[in-house]
Amino acid sequence: MNEATKTTKDITKKVKVESFDISRSDETLDLAKDLAKFIKDNKLTTNVQGKEFVNVEGWQYAGSRLGIVPIVEHVINVSSPEEMKYQAKVTLFDLRHNATVGAGFAVCSNKESGKKFYQEFAIMSMAQTRAIGKAYRNCLAWIIRAAGYEPTPAEEMDYNTNTQAAAPAPAAALAQAVPAMQVVPAEAPAVAAEQAAAPVQYATASQKEEIIRLLNHPVITRPEKTKMLLNINRLDEERAVQAIAKLRKAIDDRENGEKAAA
């Protein structure tokens, strides 16, 4: 049998995996403690409204400790003339027992909040990433919960960006979104009361587009980008102007820092 004709099972049989008996509470507890430390040490979470959601890399680590790996079965282009959209299916393969133990489906569309300017490969890639997280969630949500985190992959939280939920004030939301950037101090009580009485003028479409364009810059980190996108629909026009200015300054500072380091 040559390399080209080897099946997934033939290849994965060679991989050495650890043996955990998840039916034993002591081993489950040990795994949960190890998982919690690994996720914390490597900063593999995204904070959404005060709760920690594990990124897909953390879910993959949990699966690998149990000998469970993801396999992308297919990625299908289900786009229309008005929408770029991909669907992905991922199965989970147990290396110890040579058996499929779970599956997950997911989609990604450029109609989602914050994805209007995503290129096609990014939409397709996110569909796969979400499907991996979904597959592991269906199988291992309990072990993530035992490790002290929310049992939903962080990437799935993108689905909730269009919902109206209780959220911090715009200034606090901006501070959470880009922690490395200084936020203008809160207004005096009298000014704040006056603004509260007036209708809120939310950020315009052009302001949101500029924020998204700046967030796609390589020097902006994934956590910064994710948190800003989750709060972009709650920014008023003034805060949107401040966010754009701070993003531009952060990009300039970081680019200059990289040039100086080089």
Image (cartoon, rainbow, N blue to C red):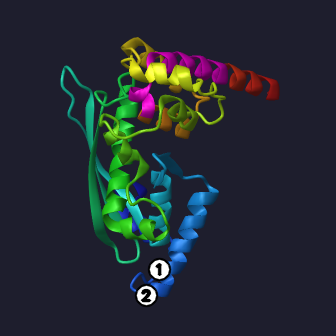
Image quarter hosting the C terminus: top right
As displayed, is residue 198 above or below residue 168? above
Camera-nearest residue between 124 and 56: 56
Residue matched to label 1: 28
Can the viewer see residue 2 in this picture? yes
Q: Which label is found at residue 123?
A: none
Which region of the structure is painted magenta? 231-251
Residue at screen point 51% across, 72% down: 32
Residue sitting farthest toward the front? 190
What residue sits right under mark 2 in the picture?
24
Q: Where's residue 158, x and y in %?
A: 36, 40
Q: Residues within 10 Å of mark 2 (few under 14, many from 20)?
A: few
Q: Tell me whether the residue at label 2 lies in contact with that at label 1, contact meaning CB atoms closer than 8 angstroms.
A: yes
Q: Residue at x 42, y 39 (%)?
A: 167
Position of the N terminus, as image quadrant, is bottom left
Name which residue type carries label 2.
Answer: Arg
Q: Residue furthest top?
A: 206
Marks 2/1: CA–CA distance: 6 Å
The residue that appears at 33% across and 55% down in the rendered structure is 134
Q: Nearer the viewer, residue 107 or 53?
A: 53
Question: How far from the left and from the top, in percent, is residue 142?
Answer: 38, 70
Question: Which secondary structure, mark 1?
Answer: helix
